[in-house]
Amino acid sequence: MDTAFAKNRFSGAPRAADFTIDQAWDTYSAAEHDRWDRLFRRQREVTKGRACAAALEAMAALELSPSGIPHMGRLSDRLEKLTSWRIVPVAELVPDEIFFEHLANRRFPAGAFIRPEAEFDYLQEPDIFHDIFGHVPLLANPVFADFMQAYGKGGQRAMKLGQLHNLARLYWYTVEFGLIQETDGLRIYGAGILSSPQETVFALEDASPNRIGFDLKRLMRTKYIIDDFQQTYFVIDSFEALLEACYQDFGNVYAEVKGLPDVEAGEVVAGDCVVTRGSHAYFDAGGRSRKL
Ligand code: HBI
Ligand code: FE
């Protein structure tokens, strides 16, 4: 767990053994509620025509709106009716084994804090806007909800096998930065993109990044960067296809991947199903303008 993250006003809150805290919804200030509304209105505009259908439909079903910071308990009551998932408040990143335990039991740990005004555009750690606007809608999709629970169970196993870095790449290139092919074009489902106004446009429309068809073993070998736009995005055909690809014994997958060299973040390799081969112009010009 990276403890270098900046502390926030929930960092010292009393926490349970599973690292959950009281969201203390009544303590949010008018300024914090207003910040949520401004983040929400901007991202709702940017994601029109760019977010996947499942995310847009879920926003409505979950009644997510620019009416102040959501109460996680009340939002969970709506979510639970759809896919048995609940959202549990945490102060900041939690240890991997705690994170996996929550996912394996259909609990999504969401940061209770909202980014400070000074970090309105850019933020290193997941705040409530990234977690709820980015991650929660897809938990309302039954197939993706199953995938996220399977990921949690897979994480518990990967830790035992010492293969966490491979599984973290799966999370990174799907749950955080995944694209999906829909009938009228590529759309976004990754939370790290959905919660970022700049990357929402970059991931779909910029000529710089590669866009490559999802291939589990290839993806598990691929390095990633955390403080800029992605150099490669992986494209799934459907959540069913993603779930299907992951319903296998990862032990065999790890064994195969273990013997193979890592792939650099911007590389295209033999066997890739290339949707678009990136120009890399953004990265060659120095990059580093990624905003969460
Ligand atoms: N903790 N609260 C929180 N949110 C995350 O997204 C998260 C985490 N801990 C670990 C983690 N993500 C990643 O290392 C996963 O790949 C496990
Ligand atoms: Fe995230």
Image (cartoon, rainbow, N blue to C red):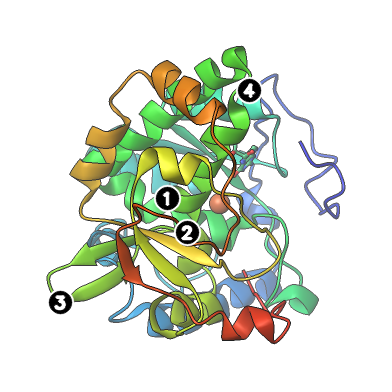
State the separation of the CA atoms marked 1 and 3: 20 Å
Q: Is residue 70 visible?
A: no
Mark number displayed over residue 184: 3
Number of other residues with Cα within 10 Å of mark 2, as a class: few under 14, some 14 to 19, many 20 or more: many
For disc 4, the marked residue is 97
Q: Amino acid at mark 4?
A: Glu
Can you identify the residue that label 2 sits on? 177
Q: Is residue 174 above or below residue 95?
A: below
Asked if the residue at tag 1 contacts the one at tag 2, i.e. Cβ–Cβ closer than 8 Å, the answer is: yes
Do the CB atoms of the residues marked 4 and 1 lie less than 8 Å apart? no
Select label 4 or label 1 by which is in front: 1
- Residues under labels 2 and 4: Cα distance? 22 Å
Identify the residue at horizontal 76%, vertical 70% (top origin). Answer: 116
Mark sitting on residue 174: 1
| Distance CA(mark 3)–CA(mark 2) | 20 Å
Quarter of the picture for ligand 1?
top right
Residue displayed at 68% across by 35% down: 21
- Front residue (pair 95, 116): 95
User: Quadrant of residue 217 in the image?
Assistant: top left
Mark 3 or mark 2, earlier in chain: 2
The answer to the question of whether label 2 and label 4 lie on touching residues, with beta carbons closer than 8 A, is no
